Amino acid sequence: MTSPKYNNSAAFYDVDGTLIQINIVHTFAFYAARQASWRKSVRTTVQTAMSVPLFVAADKVSRKWFNELFYNYYEGFSLDRLEILAEELFEDVIKPKIYPRTVGLVEESRRAGCRQVIVTGALDFTMAPLARYLGIEHVIANSLEFKNGIATGKLKKPFVGGATKPVLMRQFAQEHGLDLSESFAYSDSYSDFPMLAVVGRPTACNPDRRLKAVATSYDWPVVELR
Amino acid sequence: MRTSRPRTRSAAREHIVTIDTDSAPRIMFSGENFVVEDLPVGTRCIYPKAPLAGIDNRVAAVRYALNHPEGMDPLHSMLKPGMKVTIAVDDISMPLPMMRTPDVRQTVLEIVCEMLVDHGVDDVEIIIALALHRRLTEQEIKRMVGPKVYRDYWPDRLYNHDACDPDGMVVLGRTRHGELVETNKRAADSDLCIYVNVNLVPMNGGQKSMGVGLTGYESLKSHHTPKAIVDSDSYMDPDNSAIASSIGRIGRVVEKEIKVFHIETVLNNRMFDGPMDFLMKKEDDYTEGDRLKFQGMKWALDRMPFAARRELFQRMPAAFDLIGVYAGACDPCHAKTLEKSWGQYCVEVEGQADIMITGIPYLSPYNVNSKALNPLLVQVLALGYLYHMYRKKSLLKEGGVLIITHPCSDKWDPVHHPSYIEFFNRLLPETKDAYELEKKYQDEFAYNPTYVEMYRRGHAYHGAHPFYMYYWGQRGREKCGRVIVVGADNETVPEMLGWETAGSMAEAIAMGRSSMGQSAQISMLHQPPFLLTDVI
């Protein structure tokens, strides 16, 4: 089936909870457990586990605070190690957690002619294998700052998440000559309302209760990829 | 409700009652409830025929049909070990309500599958021929085919047709009118295709089975158009239907490429029994027991929440009987089916009506096990199906007034009908012109990847389906002068559909008379059970 209708469109996907079951805490736990020595691995894992309540509290207040606090834990990792671990992370953690209908959704979207774009608050190197696996050619994600190949624990700006997602999506659309009103966005969380509201064809995927209520009010389709 | 009067004046024909001053009030469906209305003196109430007697031994009848087919060799003589066979079977959009188990498809499939095994045919797959309808759930399939076939074939050899599978569809060519003929690849690659049909009304079956059931959007878009619908004088009479002609052309191209053995089953109209059997009678013939049943049910329905009422109706399967089973080549087999079906449904009526009244029930081919009969489905039921329950000439005069009873609630099933919601809320406020909607938006919805995904892997109707529903109402929209809804719980939905509302039946009739005159002929179609009028 051919679709000339959507050649000027993009499909923007949130990842955590939308296309896959895991979230960035799982990702970080994976890295925490893979330190250079086993002692360090144990220490970092315990530290991470103990920090969970802090992460939860920070996330409730502000996603920006959460990310600043959270990504600080990456300090000291080398880029090449993170990239190698990202491949392992994908095979061991992410791939088994891809929702059953994710591949189908991306395939339909690609077949319809949409440009495929991941838009996520996760780190770019962790998303690269997933994007490659799903055949998604563009990734808009957070990037760590590196000095001499070592992570500083800070994120590069602009920080991807919440209200900045639509800004970056708009920029992407402009750069690629796409029409946002004809584009699609998929997310599971009410926190991505800005990302969903900026496109003409938003879709709630496995939505939380609040997003489901919004989707029902606005007549957005609700898809269960789980 | 008043007791019925023994002296109600009946017309000469037994299926027509003319309302007199002391006639019993009439019971009509209004979605998931009933309304009781006193109709004006002189109103002609048209009732369905009594159910034709069912065949006592279904299994024997099916076996006889397979061994004595029309225009083809008996099925067993075509079977050879090692051959590839595909069985296509109608989905649960028919019959309505769902049939009490065993479903007639179960009976046919068990016999056919046993025969295939006995002849060493192992490469057999069963496909639910749903075209762009929603995929059936595992439980629905199990109920339809029965435990034995389910156990032997599900899920690898018993599955839903997927009209959007790029690897699962194949183009067979074009008709002489240029219509694209696309069909299921597995069926096309088979040495023999067996189509198992269920015929509730005469628009089911025939070339529509292969010509629609196993096709896809690219084929359907050539005849599911406002123009083809408007050019179809009678949906229930294939000879007077442009859409049936187009489907016939497509079906014949399919049959040129694929050897198809049709098995058509015809059901009677026994849609209600047990606690609802009063619906099979004229109100004047009610016994005390019938009145008690109705009053008890109405009392309960009035107090139940919507979801519970819906659930109650959905859990009442119908006791349809098999009244005919024919097999063999499509056209000769279907000719017999049509004769039998018309024999059950057609009721002779003298002259057309100026005002036609009909209740709108809770059921439709497209909302089986759904959460609601949504506004677009109310529209297609009223203007597409119930208005068109006739052969040759419509009951309602051109420019006449159609009065329906339904709440027209703004209720949707987002799992089954996601694209309907967008169609209704985004497109209809912009334009109600079916031709413009087709041109401007149909492809956009059909190729929308979210809707395609929901059709292929969820249980949603295809993105183009709401357009078809709207087109099916187009002829009714063009032919009816006014449509008036009684009992609507809101103004928005009727307005969006271009309908007027009335606070009561009396008001609706007065509005109708203001257009058609005080002496307007008023007819009420007392359905379901369904009937077809033969206007003479």
Image: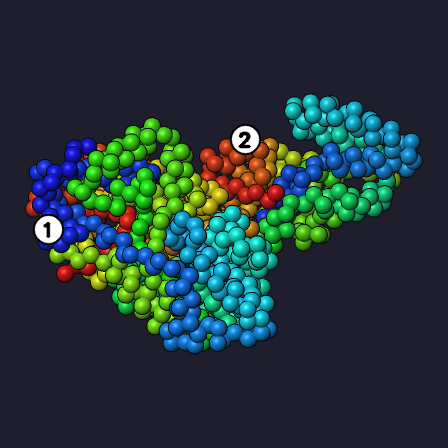
Q: Kindly indicate the quadrant of the structure image that contains residue B34.
A: top left
Residue B297 seen in the current view: yes
Q: Residue at x 52, y 64 (%)?
A: B114
Q: Residue at x 10, y 43 (%)?
A: B8
Parent chain of label 2: A
Residue B412 seen in the current view: no
Please name the residue that numbered disc 2 is placed on. A210
Q: Residue at x 68, y 45 (%)?
A: A98
Q: Tell me if mark 2 has few (under 14), some (14-19) or many (20+) residues whose alpha carbon lies within 10 angstroms of its own.
A: few
Residue B168, above or below A140:
below
Residue A89, above or below B197:
above
Q: Position of residue B494 (x, y in %)?
A: 29, 41
Image quadrant holding the C terminus of chain A, namely top right
**Residue B119 in the figure: left or right of residue B21:** right
Q: Position of residue B434 (x, y in %)?
A: 34, 54
Q: Residue at x 31, y 68 (%)?
A: B336
At mark 2, the secondary structure is helix
